[in-house]
């Protein structure tokens, strides 16, 4: 049997990303791994309800933005309080696309990754 475990985003500014994910989605670190030589850090974020985690990878020597290609991928979250989250994300200025016909919208994180919010 195979089950989902985690998904990864590489980030340029770990602290900025941690703050964004906490404010925007309520995600908190559940596990960390740091290289002995300080060359990288992995921080796994959880929602406190499921076992699935989002792994943020920070590479010490990375200075240029990641090439996200055509951004034809995304991570999706279900929001029980969809309208409240939509207002919050609008206030944060991170809403990048609204699909009213489908009843969904997308936000973007500090590195440009798209995150779908569904009711």
Image (cartoon, rainbow, N blue to C red):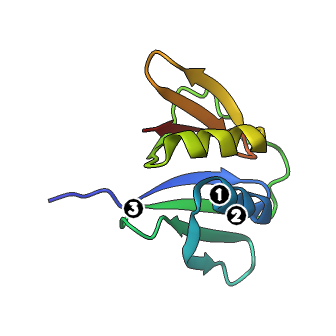
- The image position of residue 70, as x and y in percent, is 62, 23
Q: Which mark is residue 21?
A: 1
Q: Is 95 displayed left or right of 27 in the figure?
A: right
Q: Which residue is mark 2?
A: 18
Closer to the N terminus: mark 2 or mark 3? 2
SS for callout 2: helix
Q: Is 91 displayed left or right of 88 in the figure?
A: right
Assess whether mark 1 and mark 3 are in contact (beta carbons under 8 angstroms): no
Give above or below for 98 relative to 82.
above
Determine the CA span between mark 2 and mark 3: 17 Å
Give above or below for 27 relative to 119.
below
Residue at image position (60%, 70%) is: 43
Assess whether mark 3 and mark 2 are in contact (beta carbons under 8 angstroms): no
For residue 37, which quarter of the picture? bottom right
- The image position of residue 32, as x and y in percent, is 58, 78
Determine the CA span between mark 3 and mark 1: 15 Å
Q: Which mark is residue 37?
A: none
Badge 2 crowding class, 10 Å Cα cut-off, few under 14, some 14 to 19, many 20 or more, is some
Q: Is 70 displayed left or right of 66 in the figure?
A: left
Determine the CA span between mark 2 and mark 1: 5 Å
- The image position of residue 47, as x and y in percent, is 48, 64
SS for callout 1: helix
**How many numbered marks does the figure carry?**
3
Residue at image position (82%, 61%) is: 61
Closer to the N terminus: mark 3 or mark 1? 1
Q: Which residue is mark 3?
A: 52
Assess whether mark 1 and mark 2 are in contact (beta carbons under 8 angstroms): yes
Residue at image position (39%, 61%) is: 52
SS for callout 3: loop
Q: Could you tell me if residue 42 is visible in this image?
A: yes
Badge 3 crowding class, 10 Å Cα cut-off, few under 14, some 14 to 19, many 20 or more, is some
Using the image as rendered, state which of residue 73 and residue 95 is in the foreground.
95
């Amino acid at each position: 049997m195979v089950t989902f475990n985690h998904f990864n985003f590489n980030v340029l500014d770990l602290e900025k990303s941690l703050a964004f994910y906490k404010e925007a989605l309520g995600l908190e670190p559940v596990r960390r791994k740091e290289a002995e030589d300080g060359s990288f850090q992995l921080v796994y974020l959880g929602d406190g309800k499921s076992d699935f985690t989002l792994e943020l990878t920070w590479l010490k020597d990375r200075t240029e933005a990641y090439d996200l290609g055509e951004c034809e991928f995304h991570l999706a979250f279900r929001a029980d309080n969809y309208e409240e989250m939509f207002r919050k994300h609008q206030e944060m200025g991170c809403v990048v696309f609204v699909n009213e016909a489908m009843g969904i919208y997308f936000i973007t994180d500090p590195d440009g990754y798209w995150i779908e919010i569904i009711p």
